Image (cartoon, grey):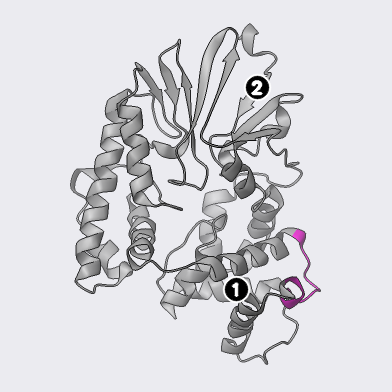
Amino acid sequence: MPAARRIGTLVNTHANGDHCYGNSLVRGAAILASKACAEEMAEVPPAVLAAFVEAAPGLGRAGEFLLRAFGAFEFRGIEPAPPTETFEGELERRVGGKRVRLIEVGPAHTKGDVLVHSLDDRVVFTGDILFIDGTPIMWEGPVAGWIRACERIEAMDVDVVVPGHGPITDRSGARRVREYLVYVRDEARRRFDAGMSAADAARDVALGDFSAWGDAERIVVNVDTLYREFSGSSEEVLATAMKTLIRHVGTRARTAPIQDHLKGRKSEMEFINGLVARKGKETGVPTPYNDAVAELARRIDAGSLRMDPSNFDLLRAMVAAG
């Protein structure tokens, strides 16, 4: 399209790589994102996924999944291009004389989800707040935030809704995603209150009509995220430890001990040393990244599922399995 030969403004609706790794291809554009989105983007640059894919052949079944999910993509050589402008709440711009409103609705799917509402066109671009004919995946939560985001879309004066994944829809698409989230939340809560484990609850929930949606196995991640929310557990230490591992992989610092990246962080240091100790190594022994990553893979194999290495819940899942 002639009007798209030069793109002057680009919006990142959230921090997942399939929605932001192409930033560098739009040269000279202003790149807009929520502040939370920009911060999350910095945590998982393309080099991280490149290193995980390279390491995958040695990671057993988890590595097989990595290759199925990411093996077709080339992450090497992608230069991160962070947002040039961030905002919190709402931001309005004019594009070709039309009003475009950016609306922050995260945390929901990720930490900094944004809706892009073209008021004059009566169109809203939802990012991954909506998966149409596919199962949403709840990496961040809280689920109430995601439900509110769907309700906001339902209340908009729009004719066309463009989801992050799946075919173009209308406001009914937001209603169906909301219904899924409410259903899974309520089913998970009943099992949580009954003392059932997250893994058993995920297997026990009958998805009914939702089972026809693609990637229905994401119920495992969604129930697990809900259980963390119900328990009010703090993930800060585990998340920081996982980020450290990911940075270690991304920089390919195979000869430096992971512990070097944790200086001054006692709680995270103790956690990583715990990984080492469980492998029969002495606490504090310099450990290349692949030792810890291989341990994560083994724990995933044991039954706790956190399939996407671009998210930082793998350590928590590993601990739950152990």
| Image position, residue 66 (x, y; %) | 55, 57
Q: Amino acid at mark 1?
A: Ala
Residue 22 vs 101, above or below: the answer is below
Q: Is residue 210 above or below residue 237?
A: above
Residue name at image x 44 percent, y 31 percent: 126
Say whether residue 301 is left or right of residue 1: left
Q: Is residue 185 magenta?
A: no
Q: Which residue sits at x=51%, y=56%?
A: 308
Residue 198 x %, y %: 32, 68
Task: Specify the amino acid type for callout 2.
Answer: Thr
Of the two numbered discs 1 and 2 in the rendering, the one whose residue sits closer to the viewer: 2
| Rendered location of residue 132, percent (x, y) | 35, 34
User: What span is colored magenta in the figure?
Assistant: 251-261
Report whether 278 appears left or right of 152. right
Mark 1 near mark 2, Cβ–Cβ under 8 Å? no
Q: Which residue is mark 2?
A: 9
